[in-house]
Image (spheres, rainbow, N blue to C red):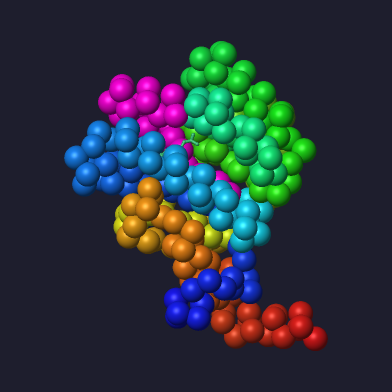
Amino acid sequence: MSPDQKDSLPERIPTHVGIIMDGNGRWAQARGLPRLAGHRAGTENLRRVIAACIEFGIKYLTIYAFSTENWARPTDEVQGLLKIFESVIDNELQELYDQGVQLRHLGRLDRLKPDFRAKVLKAIEFTRQNDRLVLNIAFNYGGRDEIVCAIQAMIRDGVDADAVNDELVSQYLFTAGIPDPDLIIRTSGELRASNFLIWQGAYSEWYFPATYWPDFDRQELLRALHEFSQRQRRYGLTGEQIKTQKKKKQA
Ligand code: FPP
């Protein structure tokens, strides 16, 4: 990013940004702190990134907070992450509401305790009318699990095999009605999708900063947006075809 770009927004802003908030553990380790301190710092950072998304006009933000595979982590870390999720709902809901955030959950709620599950559903209902930023919290989420759930639901609904197409599958996913992510960011230098939005991310642009999640600030997000605006999205076409399409649209 050149110095004059430092604070200006690029012309093309992604509608939907997905984030794999990776590196909390290493952030904590580097400071001699327990892993949960990293997750708490990551949660603090999330507040800043939500504010920046609103400021930049991003309409959908999907965060990977807990995967279907994360249950296998040490019990105290799993319990700590559940507590963090609950405390976000207990302590941040009003502020999120006031910011115009609509909360949604991606994944399964069935492994959560009934009162916690009820709390999550209530929070979703409370913010349902907000439309400044849709915040999808992927918690107990896995892309493969999501596709399995979609197939099961289609079979239960008696969907005819010939009626199954891209659009129908999308309607059966947890993200039904939400546009596919334009940009997916994974912090901490890891270069994997890790079961995150594997259907929806088919044509997403990926961005892999080395920064650990707790340090991924507004400026870093702005850098990601500038990088995104330089990318040519081709959806399987050639660069020439895309240029012709663009010219036609402008005419
Ligand atoms: C990955 O870093 C991060 C997670 C598995 C948890 C992310 C969760 C939060 C930031 C809490 C936000 C919560 C909600 C529900 C709003 P890692 O632990 O794998 O890091 P490492 O690779 O450095 O060990």
Determine if residue 200 is in view: no
Q: Quadrant location of the C terminus?
A: bottom right
In the image shown, does 49 or 62 lie closer to the viewer?
A: 49
* Residue 251 as seen in the image, left or right of residue 77: right
Question: Quadrant location of the N terminus?
Answer: bottom left
Q: What residue sits 71% from the left and 28% below the top?
A: 125
Q: Which residue is at the front of the view, 206 or 61? A: 61
Task: Provide the residue span drawn in magenta.
Answer: 61-84
Where residue 230 appears, as percent x and y from the top left, is 52, 76
Residue sitting at x 46%, y 63%: 219
Specify whether residue 150 is painted magenta. Answer: no
Using residue 177 as the reference point, say whether residue 222 is left or right of it: left
Q: Is residue 200 left or right of residue 246?
A: left
| Residue lying at 67% horizontally and 23% vertically, measured from the top left | 122
Q: Position of residue 215 (x, y in %)?
A: 37, 53
Q: Position of residue 5 (x, y in %)?
A: 51, 77
Residue 248 in the image: above or below residue 56: below
Question: Farthest right residue?
Answer: 251
Residue 98 shows up from this direction: yes
Classify residue 104 by image quadrant: top right
Q: Please identify the quarter of the rendering in which residue 159 is found.
A: top right
Residue 71 colored in magenta in the image: yes
- Callout count: 0
| Residue nearest the observer in this picture, 112 or 232 | 112
Task: Report the image quarter containing ligand 1.
Answer: top left
Q: Quadrant of residue 238?
A: bottom right
Which residue occupies 60% across, 85% down? 240
Front residue of 168 and 133: 133
Residue 119: image location, x then y, percent: 60, 21
Give the left or right position of residue 55, taking residue 219 as reference. Answer: right
